[in-house]
Amino acid sequence: MAEGGVADKVLDETQKELQECPICYTEYKDPRMLDCSHIFCLKCLQELRLTQNKDDKNIVCPLCRKETGLTEAGVDMLPGGSKYVNQQEQTEGQGLKVMCHACDDENEAISRCMDCKHYLCQDCLKVHNRLAPLKSHKIVALTELPVESQEITEETELKKVPKCFKHPDQDLCLYCNSCEVLICRECTNIDHKESMHSHVGIDQAVSRCKQEVHESVSKTEECIQRFISANPSSGHSRFRLDKMLVKTYTQISQKAEKETAKIREKEKQLKTEARAIAIKRDTEFAYAETSEQIVGKVNEVMTTATCYEILESKKKMLRDLNKQVEVHKSLDIKHGKSFLGFQESEEVGQLGTLLLEEKWERDEAFSQSIYNPQHLAAYSTSEMVVTCSNKLVTLDSEGKVISTKTYKPDPDQPSEPHDPNDIQKATALAINKDDQLLILDNPAVKIFNKEYQLLHQFLPGKEAGMDGTPTCLAVDSSNLIAKHSDCNFTNRTDLKHFEQDMGL
């Protein structure tokens, strides 16, 4: 009894699966069969077709991945499914209730197209009648159908000769071996001419098809038997494969953790080395700053202290100064020692090496951005201003031009009237701490913002100790301006002093 109960349950589940579409998992609606014998709803196949390559004349079964050749009519011309999925829903006590096959609105059908073999609701009937290729189809109301027609079986449907899609008034009576499609007599005069295609009758084609299928089934069964004989325990093999996959995953993860640990250890080592180098160099820089402070304090004592205080501090001052002399003999203070970098390695699993010296290379892209550069100054944002033969050019850090300022009026005719924002010729450049551009435009010093808008200007003269024409320009962090004249001396001037003198 128990075995019978289980068998009945399995049978019920199998019958239920036969009545459900494997794509939408609902009861079949207008089922169609692929060449692999798998059955799906027509609408599901239409949607599946949209997701696959439209240029390919085949449709791939989502279950077994086998291909089914399609005619130009597409999936609509695929044969109907089995009798298990063609049953119509019956309402208890009300007889047969037929749903529309042409839409998915679950409307009840009122008629049937005898050529398309579709039940149609009122809306779909109107659409069907408006299509020119379908006007010759025979439409019969359900109320006028005989009882035997309402309960169409699979056998009667198979006996009915379908019509050609291209020639609706012609029966599909031939099979084209070249294209492997059903055709009508009219097709042999157009797309399937006898001079290029091989045609046979339906009976002969079916007989040959059955023979080919029978032979293919026999070969498949032989392959299955050989496989079973050689692999009697495929279930054990699958179980072992699953276990081996888990083991492989574990081994990969363990190796990755080991490699990660090595990289982390190398990272720690490189950071320790970099920190040690930075501390040593910083200590040397600090000694240099300390020496300056000590010298400054000694000078202060010598200039401000009394003779008694100087003599009392003599021993300490000499000791500190001598110590600084000894320290400086061992120090190697260079600006290049402020550089510390890292070079990534191109080898797999390697981090790289520390860079202790700065190397400069010529940037060809930058050199091509300007022609005949003469002077250069850099903003704190890494943007640069360069003087060329007839203009100023602002560049970004990669050498791309941001803006330009052309010289005018003509430097050979400086007496011509011009805008104060104009520059005749920049002979020197500098940038102050406020990122303002100082330009020596003889005889004036002009201060511009980044957009080349004039902010201030002044004329250095004898009151500033300037004899001759300035040739160089520099500014420090306190906005003190240094100008070098052709008389070979340097003059330092406070910018604020000039602003007051010029009334700015």
Image (cartoon, grey):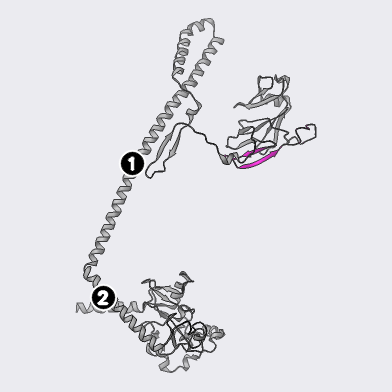
Position in image of residue 330 (x %, y %): 43, 19
Q: Find residue 222 and name its label.
A: 2
Which sits in the foreground, 19 or 376? 376
- 10 Å crowding of disc 1: few (<14), some (14-19), many (20+): some
Position in image of residue 88 (x %, y %): 40, 85
Which sits in the foreground, 331 or 298? 331
Residue 393 among magenta residues: yes
Quadrant of res 242 = bottom left
Q: Residue at x 40, y 39 (%)?
A: 352
Q: Residue at x 50, y 16 (%)?
A: 294
Q: Find residue 262 and name its label.
A: 1
- Quarter that holds the C terminus: top right
- Quarter that holds the N terminus: bottom left
Q: Residue furthest left?
A: 1
- Rendered view: 306 above or below 411: above
Span colored in magenta: 392-418
Quadrant of res 27 = bottom left
| Cα–Cα span, label 2 and label 1 | 55 Å
Q: Is residue 436 left or right of residue 241?
A: right
